[in-house]
Every structure is written in structure tokens, then in C-alpha cells.
Amino acid sequence: MLKTLSFFTLLLLFNVMAKAQSHTDSVVKHSPARTLTYKQYQAYLKGEAADDMAQVAEMNHYPMPDKALKWKKELALNPDQVQKITEIKAYMHRRRLQIGGSVIATEKMLDSLFRYHKMDDGSLIFYTNRYGLYQGELKNAILQACLATQQALTPQQNDKLATLQKTD
């Protein structure tokens, strides 16, 4: 009886482990660009990549437009400011989408050249420089949005936003 019970307990344990493994495997999604994680790939596709590139601006009270809009009531933004900051946010999003698509295409090209053993020095220099250019464009788009947002706010609104963000 004890052997039968142990056998069924062991069988049940293996069954649970197998189901857990298959569930995990079905949840993990793979990126079409093998060199990017699914999360990175989706962020580039959705125009949400590289928020961390705004750090230098945000540390010095040049806010991201979405953060200023989040506090529009507390900052008492007027309709013109809301429209201007919304336009800044939309432009930054469009640029992030454009650049994100270029980053994905470059990653795929690098992967393809290496995978099919077609890489040479010239191609490597070209595509890695191109990649660096896209990263610079992305950072510029984000920092330009921070600069424009800061300029759309009054000094008092900028100070208030800095205070609000500290408590957030």
C-alpha cells in the first residue's frame, strides 16, 4: 500500500512539474529579431523604448511630456499648454516609432550577415555606425521633447512638477 501511494505521489509530482514547464514554455514569447528580447522588440515597435535616455534631462528638471501631462490639474496647465505638450509627446512618439523600426531592421541585418557568414569589415563598420546613429537620434528625440516641455511650462510650474515627482 505504501509503495502504491508513493508511486502515485511521485506520478502526481511529475505531472504537475510537466504542466508547469509546458505553461512556462507557452508563455515565453520570442522576438522576431533574435538579438532583441521580446520586451525590447515590443518597446521599439510601440515607440516606448529608451525612457532611461531622459535621465540627464529629468535629473535637471526638464520633464518628459507625459509626466507633465500626468500632473496637468495640479500644475494648472492652461489649454494652450496642454495642446503644446500633447503635440510634443505625439512628435516624440512618432520619432521613437521611426527610429525603433530602424533599430529593429539593423539588428535583423546584423544577425543575418553573421548567421549566413556574409559579414565583412566594411559591413560591420557600416551597420554598427548606423546603430550608433539611431541610438543618438533616439536620445536626441527624447531630450528635445524634455527641453520643449520644460519651455512650455512656467518656472513655477516646473518647480511644482519637481516637487510632485518627488512625492510620486
Image: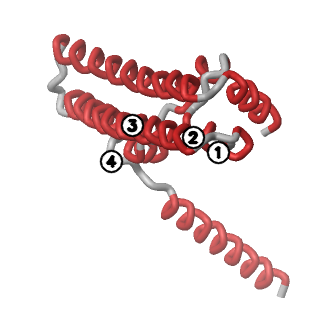
- The image shows residue 18, relative to residue 28, as above or below, that is below
| Residue located beneath label 4 in the image | 32
Residue 16 rendering spot, x and y as whole percentages? 66, 72
Assign a secondary structure to mark 4. Answer: loop
What residue type is disc 4 on? Pro
Which of the pair 40/7 is nearer the observer? 40
Residue 70: mark in rendering: 1
What residue type is disc 2 on? Asp
Assign a secondary structure to mark 2. Answer: helix
What residue type is disc 3 on? Tyr
Residue 91: mark in rendering: 3
| Mark 4 burial class by Cα count in 10 Å: few <14, some 14-19, many 20+ | few
Residue 66: mark in rendering: 2
Assign a secondary structure to mark 1. Answer: helix
Disc 3/disc 4 C-alpha distance (Å): 26 Å
What residue type is disc 1 on? Lys
Which tag is nearer the camera, tag 4 or tag 2? 2
Quarter in which the N terminus is drawn: bottom right
Q: Residue at x 69, y 41 (%)?
A: 76
Disc 4/disc 1 C-alpha distance (Å): 33 Å
